[in-house]
Image (spheres, rainbow, N blue to C red):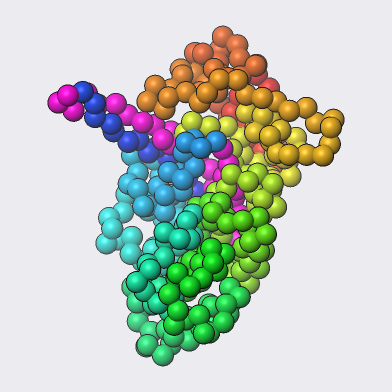
């Protein structure tokens, strides 16, 4: 069963330029994107910096308004709901932010940080809320004594655990993980990933997981979605994507993962990512693609579906 379905989602930002700020251009941060996330699975979202990963995630959970398209959460379209109508959904959808140093209020005790979603979304008594706080701290591997401390007293990994405890406090069905390990050192990254996996098994929560570390995405994800310049170029089962990538961009991205196998030939992308204010016509990857032909300049590639729901957007495969 699909918990989340995204249909033809677009998120454009307007940019004013000129002396009088009258000239208007659109940045197509997310442009006509469609995918689904099954209940209880993890969808990994990868791509270069600036490709629209975080914008897609923030639009999906309605931190940004939708320009066009549908976001179905448990069968209900939340894309056009007002902030008041969204309140009941906020309890079911939570976020783990990228920077554990910036996402926790330094003036609040840990117990108040974890209690905040409970104060907003529940009518539990103070004693019940405190019990949930202590339970969540233990779930993420922290002691009850931590409840009366402040964020500056913890390391980066411990702060991220507090962020995870806050997200879990209202028992959400869906958690948007916006690069939750990028600000942590390697040993702590593995601990946080293992914690997220254990919590998923226990609570049955669904993740949208964004990261730059491709090997970590492979480890945690059931399916992987690859983005380039606001478009999805390939989506499929994690092992299929990593073992037999089909899109030339996916191949280049995966060849950048360090390996001790000398037989793997590294594919180096030429040129820079085009300006999102003026993306190429047709296929957006064509300016850096070795397989580019005339049709790539004229038409946007349509989805080609292979076995096990493996979808690729490319004219020449």
* Camera-nearest residue between 156 and 49: 156
Residue at image location 53% in from the left, 43% down from the top:
35
Where is residue 174 shown, x and y percent of the image? 50, 61
Image: 111 above or below 22: below
The answer to if 40 sits in the magenta stretch is yes
Q: Is residue 67 left or right of residue 51?
A: left
Q: Relative to 137, say whether 281 is above or below.
A: above
Which x, y percent locates residue 91? 41, 67
Q: Position of residue 136 (x, y in %)?
A: 53, 77
The residue positioned 35% from the left and 35% from the top of the image is 12
Number of dots carrying numbers: 0
The segment highlighted magenta reads 19-47
Predominant secondary structure in magenta?
strand
Along the line of sight, the residue nearer the viewer: 212 or 237: 212
- Measuring 42% from the left and 54% from the top, which residue is drawn there? 61
Q: Look at the image and tell me in which quarter the N terminus lies.
A: bottom right
Question: Does the magenta segment cover residue 244?
Answer: no
Question: What residue is rendered at 49% in x and 31% in y?
Answer: 229
Q: 28 or 21: which is nearer to us?
A: 21
Quarter of the rendering containing residue 190: bottom right
Report the residue that reaches farthest toward the left.
20
Residue 86: image quadrant is bottom left
In the rendered image of this protein, does residue 217 appear above or below residue 304? below
């Amino acid at each position: 069963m699909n918990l989340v379905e995204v249909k033809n989602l677009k998120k454009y930002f307007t940019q004013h330029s000129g002396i009088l700020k009258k000239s208007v251009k659109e940045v197509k941060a997310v442009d006509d994107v469609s995918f689904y996330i099954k209940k209880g699975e993890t969808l990994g979202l990868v791509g270069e910096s600036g490709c629209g990963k975080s914008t897609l995630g923030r639009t999906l959970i309605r931190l940004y308004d939708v320009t066009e398209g549908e976001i179905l959460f448990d069968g209900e379209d939340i894309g056009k709901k007002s902030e008041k109508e969204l309140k009941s959904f906020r309890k079911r959808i939570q976020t783990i932010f990228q920077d554990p140093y910036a996402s926790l209020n330094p003036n609040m005790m840990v117990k108040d940080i974890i209690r905040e979603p409970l104060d907003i979304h529940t009518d539990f008594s103070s004693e019940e809320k405190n019990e949930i706080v202590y339970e969540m701290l233990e779930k993420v591997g922290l002691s009850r004594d931590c409840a009366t401390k402040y964020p500056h007293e913890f390391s980066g990994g411990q702060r991220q655990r507090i962020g995870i405890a806050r997200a879990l406090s209202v028992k959400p069905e869906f958690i948007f993980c916006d690069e939750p390990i990028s600000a942590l050192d390697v040993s702590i990254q593995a601990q946080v990933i293992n914690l997220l996996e254990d919590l998923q098994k226990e609570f049955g929560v669904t993740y949208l997981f964004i990261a730059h570390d491709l090997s970590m995405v492979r480890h945690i994800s059931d399916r992987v979605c690859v983005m380039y310049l606001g478009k999805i170029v390939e989506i499929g089962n994690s092992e299929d994507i990593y073992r037999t990538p089909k899109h030339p961009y996916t191949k280049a991205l995966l060849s950048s993962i360090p390996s001790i196998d000398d037989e793997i030939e590294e594919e180096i992308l030429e040129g820079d990512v085009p300006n999102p204010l003026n993306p190429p016509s047709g296929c957006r990857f064509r300016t850096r693609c070795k397989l580019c032909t005339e049709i790539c300049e004229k038409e946007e590639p349509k989805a080609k579906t292979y076995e096990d729901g493996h979808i690729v957007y490319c004219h020449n495969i």
